[in-house]
Structure formats: C-alpha cells, structure tokens
Image (cartoon, grey):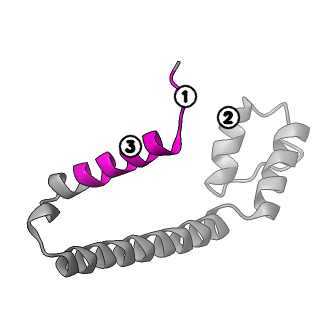
Amino acid sequence: MRKLSFSHIGTWIRSKIFLYNVTYGLYMLDWWERYLFNTIMILLLCVLCYNGSRFAVESLERYANLEDLLEIAIRIIWNTSAGSHEDKFMNMHMGHHYSPSN
C-alpha cells in the first residue's frame, strides 16, 4: 500500500484542477476570466443550496407537523381493529380519520 504524503495529495489536487479546467474549457481563458467564471459558479451554487434548504424546511414544516405525526402514530397503535396499518395511515394522511369506535 502506498503511503500518502503531501506531495501525492498536491499532485492529486493539481490533476483534479487540470481535469476541471479541461472539462469546462477554462484552460483557454485568461486568469481573470477563470476567476470570474469560478466566482459566478460558486455564487450560483450558494444560491442553489440556500434556496434548496429553505424549500426543504418549508416543505417539512408544511407536510410533517409533529403533532399530526404523533396523532397518526397513536391512532395506528391504538386502533388495530380497522384494517391494516397501511390503510389506516393512508386514510389518516389523506384527511380521513378513524374514530376510536370503528
């Protein structure tokens, strides 16, 4: 097994940067054009991650209220006579609630 040293890690990083430059055609740009392109790409990636995280949080808050999940779990546990658990979960999730007498 090969030992990892700083020279091997530096060579690996340089090869990945070279591959990135060749893949996206950045090798033919001036240094300032590469920095501009990379800055724009990093900003777009940050905006994408920020909006994706906001969307995920809002979706989870909207569709997965803790109280609703606890109510569904309690109804599934205590109401075992009204069909399978999957049927009860789907009906409760769709807004059809079983009463304890069913």
Q: Which residue is more in the foreground, 91 or 60? A: 60
Q: Which residue is more in the foreground, 72 or 47? A: 47
Depicted 14 relative to depicted 68: above or below: above
Q: Which residue is mark 2?
A: 86
- Mark 3: which amino acid? Trp
Q: What's the CA distance linking mark 3 and mark 1?
A: 14 Å
Residue 6 drawn at (x, y percent): 51, 45
Which numbered disc covers residue 62? none
Q: Secondary structure at mark 3?
A: helix
In the rendered structure, which segment of residues is drawn in magenta?
Answer: 2-19
Q: Which residue is mark 1?
A: 3
Other-residue count near label 2 (Cα within 10 Å), few / some / many at <14 / 14–19 / ≥20: few
Residue 47 is left or right of residue 73, and the answer is left
Q: What's the CA distance linking mark 1 and mark 2?
A: 53 Å
Q: Which residue is mark 3?
A: 12
Mark 3 or 2: the one toward you: 3
By secondary structure, the bulk of the magenta-drawn segment is best described as helix
Examine the structure image and report whether residue 87 is included in the region drawn in magenta: no
> Which residue is situated farthest in the left direction here?
28
Q: Secondary structure at mark 2?
A: helix
Q: Residue at 83% of width from left, 55% of height from top?
A: 71
- Mark 2: which amino acid? Glu
Residue 20 is left or right of residue 51, and the answer is left
> Which residue is situated farthest in the top direction here?
1
Looking at the image, tell me whether mark 3 or mark 2 is earlier in sequence order.
3
